[in-house]
Image: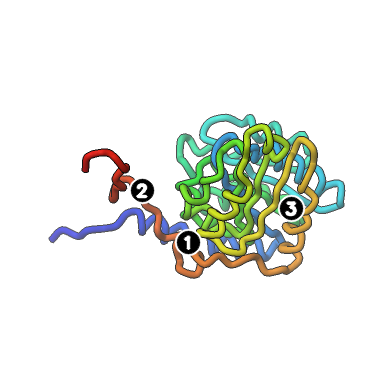
Amino acid sequence: MCRSVDLHRAVLARNDDNATALRRYLDRHGTTAVNLMSSPGSGKTELLEVLLTRAREQGARVAAVTADLATENDARRLARSRAPVQQILTDGLCHLEAGMLQARLEPWLPEGTRLLFVENVGNLVCPASYDLGETLRIVLVSVTEGEDKPLKYPAAFGLAQAVVVTKTDLAEAVGFDRSGFRAGLRQVNPHVPVFETSARTGAGVDDLLAHVMACADGRAPHTPVLARQHAHHLHHHPAATSTTPVPGTPP
């Protein structure tokens, strides 16, 4: 007798189990994990370097894990903040999984770490489906990427507990439509907190760090509507299952 197995659901179920174990591990160590997701080139590493530096200046014990497909460049950049940093090489895998993170943390997490930033792989599709045991999930988008990113990637933005707009010092030069962006974001994630930042000028960084610290101190993060529907299990590739006709073209 043949038996059909949904491998993807099995992978997600295993990840959820690992995320639960990782969350308990972090709780025992008094560590709050912040999962940072974005597309490549959003300025995530640059902003994280500034966040780590300012957190250290304020006396917070912080650390970071950064994930990349092949190089350790991001870890070297983040180390300039003088915070403890570890690199995970995914060997081509497009996302981090809870088991990978746990395996790296257990022999390394510095004693007394209050905040742990996890810089996920640069990708707005696959990482959205994987719980990493985090307390706060933040999605970043730069002004150079256009206003319609929330509508193009509804799972990533719809599950975010905070959204960060980066490179705002370039907003005017690239004609970033702020109101259009926020209107699209409200469609997929009403009431999500939004922080506009510039790592170059420092604008907005302190407000973002204060929000993260407040969540570490017990403030309840925003609860997205999509999260209440357990949408993190809806990992799929819509283009493979549906099509939208383009006006003026034959069906």
Residue at the spot 63% in from the left edge and 53% down from the top edge: 163
Residue occupied by mark 3:
208
Tell me whether the residue at label 3 lies in contact with that at label 2, contact meaning CB atoms closer than 8 angstroms: no
Alpha carbon separation for disc pair 3 and 1: 28 Å
Residue occupied by mark 1:
16
Mark 3 / mark 2, whichever is N-terminal: 3
Is 81 situated left or right of 75 in this image? Answer: right
Residue 186 coordinates in the image, percent (x, y)? 56, 59
Q: Nearer the viewer, residue 65 or 37?
A: 37
Residue at the spot 29% in from the left edge and 40% down from the top edge: 248
Numbered circle sitting on residue 237: 2
Residue 69 coordinates in the image, percent (x, y)? 51, 35
Classify mark 3: helix, strand or loop: helix
Q: Nearer the viewer, residue 76 or 237?
A: 237
Q: Nearer the viewer, residue 71 or 174?
A: 174
Number of residues whose C-alpha sits closer than 10 Å to that of mark 1, classed few (under 14), some (14–19) or many (20 or more)? many
Residue at the spot 77% in from the left edge and 47% down from the top edge: 205
Number of residues whose C-alpha sits closer than 10 Å to that of mark 2, classed few (under 14), some (14–19) or many (20 or more)? few
Q: Amino acid at mark 1?
A: Asp
Q: Quadrant of the C terminus?
A: top left
Mark 3 / mark 1, whichever is N-terminal: 1
Mark 2 / mark 1, whichever is N-terminal: 1
Is 57 situated left or right of 88 in this image? Answer: right
Whether residue 35 appears in this view of the structure is: no
Residue 162 coordinates in the image, percent (x, y)? 63, 57
